[in-house]
Image: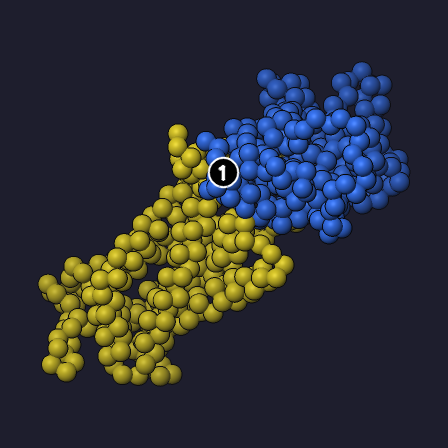
Chain colours: A blue, B yellow
């Protein structure tokens, strides 16, 4: 396959970036999108040019590191897929592919296609956990959880924190991410004890990071590589409103 | 800050304000529609005039009307605040974005649709509400009554003939067209807005969400705007002796 690329190149967060054109030939349709970038980077290295910086780690769709905005969509044209699991067979010979970093005030570009997603970590640090002494492993079935509840929690816990929801949202809102993190603990008995404080603190941190508000366009859920449902956003709204109206927190 | 100001200054709290004012305005639309359906009664406007008299003289309706005016203002101002915040959340735009691949057009253009509706409300209130309260009918630079609006007498009681004002306004084709276009904008606004209002309040459940979606799409998205748009069209056709 012959592929033309338009890639965002930016030296660091202080310098302005620009789109740069590259041409690649003999690309195998069985290559993953990131392998295609490996080929590009090898070419650039041979020519003595700076390779394109991009985030990647597990390359099997579970770590949430890869983060490219491909042809106008986060993680490219395929639904329920991360960039590393996207293959070149999803494109046609001769295609021009535009690749940009996530765009959000809360996700500043560090270099080329790499953005700083520490804002997500700070949101989780604000309350996305259960604060108990772990001790030794509890006995199995000590806390009974119905199958449907466990499934519902797992649907939310699938979130890999890649930030595609923010990248897809017209408001750069992090609602689906925060909803997934609040929801998977809120439905389980272990998360119940702190559910009010958790919702309040995580939303406050989300706002402090400068993410936008939710317009319920549904773009986040469509582009989410784990297809996390908008039901969780409704639950976050319930959790937050309920906490604000009923909790003893300031 | 008290918990109230903290909540109302959060993005979620602000969306709740949008939701509550928006859903209140939706409920107003039903009342406004049912009342105005009197225009279709072939009684030279008596039912409509009597209904208008009731609506302007009942103390409860009057109180609710102030809530209505403030809801419109709060809904519009909060939308402005949220839009500015949302735009600031993405200072660098994408060079190439394909939002149509993941979201409906209406959901991404609520601000534009809302602005059209706000302009419509201002024109609409100037034509009817202002005229009813403050006086002469001036439309297209032409004054039809000087000083006060026409009166009509039913059973010896004189009341304002708002039906005549309505018929006069809707005898202009451009004015009718303005209403029809505005109702199309209203339709698109409500298809997304009605359902979205419930989502913001956290009211989403597989048992009743299909009903909310149905009401939002067909009731508020089609039936209500279509009936509102039918009024100026019907009166125009009747005034010009076309069809009716």
Q: Nearer the viewer, residue B123 or A85?
A: A85
Query: In screen coordinates, is B155 left or right of B240?
Result: left
Q: From this view, report whether residue A112 is shown above or below residue B44.
A: above
- The answer to whether residue B64 is visible is yes
Residue at screen point 61% across, 62% down: B207
Q: Position of residue B213 (x, y in %)?
A: 56, 61
Q: Quadrant of the N terminus of chain A?
A: top right
* Kind of element beneath mark 1: loop
Q: Position of residue A80 (x, y in %)?
A: 75, 45
Residue at screen point 49% across, 52% down: B197
Give the labeled residue for mark 1: A247
Residue at screen point 70% across, 44% down: A153
Q: Position of residue B80 (x, y in %)?
A: 41, 41
Residue at screen point 85% across, 28% down: A39
Please count the marks in the image: 1
- The answer to whether residue A4 is visible is no
Q: Nearer the viewer, residue B162 or A46?
A: B162
Q: Nearer the viewer, residue A106 or B213?
A: B213
Q: Quadrant of the C terminus of chain A?
A: top left
Q: Position of residue A117 (x, y in %)?
A: 65, 27
Q: From this view, report whether residue A202 is shown above or below residue B28.
A: above
Q: Residues within 10 Å of mark 1 (few under 14, many from 20)?
A: some
Q: Pointer 1 indicates a residue of which chain? A: A
Q: Nearer the viewer, residue B230 or A24?
A: B230
């Amino acid at each position: 396959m012959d592929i033309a690329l338009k890639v965002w190149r930016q030296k660091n967060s202080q310098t302005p970036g620009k789109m740069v054109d590259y041409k690649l030939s003999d690309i195998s349709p069985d290559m993953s999108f990131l392998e295609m970038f490996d080929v590009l980077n090898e070419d650039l290295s041979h020519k003595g040019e700076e390779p394109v910086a991009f985030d990647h780690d597990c390359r099997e769709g579970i770590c949430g590191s890869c983060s490219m905005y491909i042809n106008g969509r986060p993680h490219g044209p395929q639904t329920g897929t991360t960039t590393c699991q996207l293959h070149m067979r999803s494109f046609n010979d001769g295609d021009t592919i535009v690749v940009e970093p996530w765009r959000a005030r809360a996700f500043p570009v560090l270099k080329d296609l790499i953005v700083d997603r520490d804002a997500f970590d700070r949101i989780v640090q604000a309350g996305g956990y259960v604060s108990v002494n772990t001790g030794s492993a509890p006995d199995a079935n000590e806390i009974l959880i119905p199958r449907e509840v466990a499934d519902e929690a797992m649907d939310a816990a699938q979130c890999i924190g890649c930030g595609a929801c923010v990248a897809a949202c017209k408001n750069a809102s992090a609602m689906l991410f925060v909803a997934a993190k609040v929801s998977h603990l809120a439905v389980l008995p272990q998360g119940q004890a702190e559910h009010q404080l958790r919702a309040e603190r995580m939303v406050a941190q989300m706002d402090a990071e400068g993410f936008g508000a939710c317009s319920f366009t549904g773009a986040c859920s469509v582009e989410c590589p784990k297809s996390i449902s908008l039901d969780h956003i409704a639950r976050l709204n319930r959790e937050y409103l309920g906490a604000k109206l009923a909790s003893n927190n300031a | 800050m008290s918990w109230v100001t903290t909540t109302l200054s959060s993005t979620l709290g602000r969306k709740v304000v949008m939701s509550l004012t928006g859903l209140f305005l939706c409920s107003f639309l039903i009342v406004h529609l049912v009342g105005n359906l009197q225009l279709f009664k072939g009684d030279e406007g008596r039912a409509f005039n009597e209904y208008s008299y009731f609506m302007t003289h009942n103390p409860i309706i009057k109180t609710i009307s102030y809530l209505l005016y403030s809801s419109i203002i709060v809904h519009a101002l909060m939308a402005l605040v949220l839009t500015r915040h949302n735009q600031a959340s993405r200072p660098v735009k994408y060079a190439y974005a394909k939002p149509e691949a993941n979201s409906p057009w209406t959901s991404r253009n609520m601000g534009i649709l809302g602005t059209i509706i706000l302009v419509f409300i201002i024109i609409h209130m100037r034509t009817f509400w202002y005229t009813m309260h403050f006086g002469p009918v001036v439309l297209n630079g032409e004054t039809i009554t000087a000083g006060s609006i026409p009166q009509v007498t039913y059973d010896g009681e004189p009341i304002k003939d708002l039906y005549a004002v309505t018929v006069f306004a809707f005898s202009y084709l451009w004015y009718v067209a303005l209403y029809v276009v505005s109702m199309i904008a209203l339709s698109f606004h409500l298809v997304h807005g009605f359902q979205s209002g419930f989502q913001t309040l956290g009211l989403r459940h597989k048992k009743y969400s299909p009903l909310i979606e149905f009401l939002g799409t067909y009731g508020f998205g089609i039936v209500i705007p279509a009936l509102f748009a039918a009024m100026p069209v019907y009166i125009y056709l009747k005034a010009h002796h076309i069809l009716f």
